[in-house]
Image: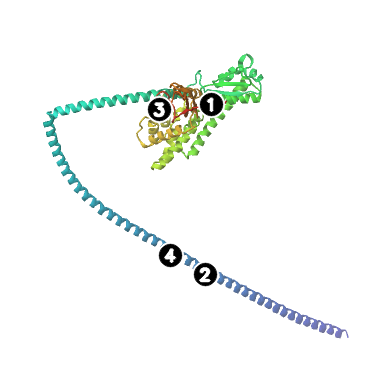
Amino acid sequence: MQAQSILLLLLLFGLGFAAHFIYRMIMEKNRVRKSRDQAQIIIEGAEKRAEEIRNRAENRAKKLVKDKNSQMQRMSSEKRKEFSSTEKKLKAREEDLNKKYEEIDRKQSELEKMQAEFESKNLAAEEKQRILDENIEEIKGKIEEISGLTREAAKAELVSLVEDEARHEAAKKLKQIEEDCNSTAEQKAKDIISLAIQRYSGRYTSEKTVSVVNLPSDDVKGRIIGREGRNIRSIELRTGVDIIIDDTPETVVISCFNPIRREVAKISLERLIADGRIHPARIEEVVSEVEKEIEKEIQKEGEKALFDLGISGMHPELISKLGMLKYRTSYSQNILNHSIEVGFICGMLASEIGYSEKLAKRAGLLHDIGKAVDHEIEGSHVDIGTNIVKKYGEPPEIIDALEKTHDPQPQGVLPLLVQAADAISAARPGARRETYENYVKRIESIEGVASSFPGVERCYAIQAGREVRVIVESDQVSDEEGAILSHEIAKKIENEVVYPGQIKIMVIRESRATAYAS
């Protein structure tokens, strides 16, 4: 029984083992089948992605090929257009050259024709000259026979007549020159003196040598003077000006021939008054600051002048000297503004005649640069200006223009342009003005000349002396005599009075008849 149980257990164990083995075999087959299916799916997916990649690559390649083809076609089209345009230009140039060749041939034929005509006329002229010489010799012989004089005697008499006539003309010309010199000598002298005064910083008086500083109150005058005058002495010593404090209310006058020093003193004094601290140390500090500001302002003005005229490449020191012209005047005309104006006018004149506009502007701007230098350097402003532009490497044309611009008869295109532009700027109405004293003297002279004639009751010079109205006694001067009187007054004014422009003389004669009815 026990043996049967063991056998049964062994049988059951064998059956279980066989069942387990069969189960394992079935599971392994299923796993292999699943793996094969997954592998097939992966392979199919890979093949599908490979197909997609291949399709995209083919599409991209086709697109690239298409783009390249279109680009090549476009480039080919542009090249064809370019070649076509070049071909047209070449054809047009060829036609132009053919026309020019035809024009040259035509002009050459005309020239040959003119040369033939000239030679023909030259031969005719030589023949006429020969006949004329024969006639002259024949006439000379007849003159000698008629006058009874030999050729040498007639020549001597003719020379004597020519000498007398030339002597008379020379005397007349000399008198005219003398009159011109007398009429312009006074004005020229004033011009020279005015220029010398601006360059000299001495203790003399002139109408354009003072600046006025307004004070908030008269109490400030005492603070400006300081204890025992130390403040005013410090200002005068540091700036080189004269401070004039008088009874004029709320006013201090600064006197100096050097306009730059005068401007420094004026600005410094205004700042000291505004600040309230006035003592020697503060004066020294403020004056130093103002001097630096004025130097910067001078450089800035010079650079601005160059910018306005479109000029470049100038030495910085020369630009600084150009800016100093802002503080110089000639007949109350600012020299820097005058120089800029001359530069513009000179450039316009140069452009009209085909000369270099930039060179002309440069010469016009620098023509008065010698006036920027003070009296420490000797010489006329022409010589000083020439030396300055030489020193700072200006072109030879500029140097030559500055040397010759103020000559009576300059030689060369550029000196003539600068001289003309200078005259135009100076002669412009309102550019320069005479002094009040000269103006009053001229008006009085004109009225005095008109009043000196008999029959003149009174006269008035109006419109700044450009018109004179003369009122005459109606019982002493007739209408006809009034016309003659106007011409006589005009002639006398021309001879005795120096004046700009023209003066209109108007003679007024008024007759009044009065009657009373009773």
Label 3 and label 2: CA atoms lie apart by 105 Å
**Which numbered marker is on residue 80?**
4
First of labels 2, 1 by sequence position? 2
Instruction: Look at 82% across and 83% down and name the residue there.
Output: 12
Where does residue 367 sit, x and y in percent of width and height? Answer: 43, 32
Amino acid at dot 1? Ala
Considering only vertical position in the picture, is 270 above or below 27? Answer: above
Residue 75 showing in the rendered view: yes
Where does residue 19 sit, x and y in percent of width and height? Answer: 78, 82
* Residue at disc 3, secondary structure: helix
First of labels 2, 4 by sequence position? 2
**Which numbered marker is on residue 515?**
1
Amino acid at dot 3? Ile
Q: Name the residue under label 2.
A: 66
* Residue at disc 1, secondary structure: loop
Where does the C terminus fall, quadrant-wise?
top right
Q: In this view, does 316 lie to the left or right of 111?
A: right
* Residue at disc 4, secondary structure: helix
Q: Name the residue under label 3.
A: 484
First of labels 4, 1 by sequence position? 4
Label 3 and label 4: CA atoms lie apart by 89 Å
Considering only vertical position in the picture, is 265 above or below 120? Answer: above
Label 2 and label 1: CA atoms lie apart by 120 Å
Amino acid at dot 2? Lys
Q: Which of marks 2 and 1 is in front?
A: 1
Q: Which of marks 4 and 1 is in front?
A: 1
Amino acid at dot 4? Arg
Instruction: Look at 43% across and 40% down and name the residue there.
Output: 348
Where does the N terminus fall, quadrant-wise?
bottom right
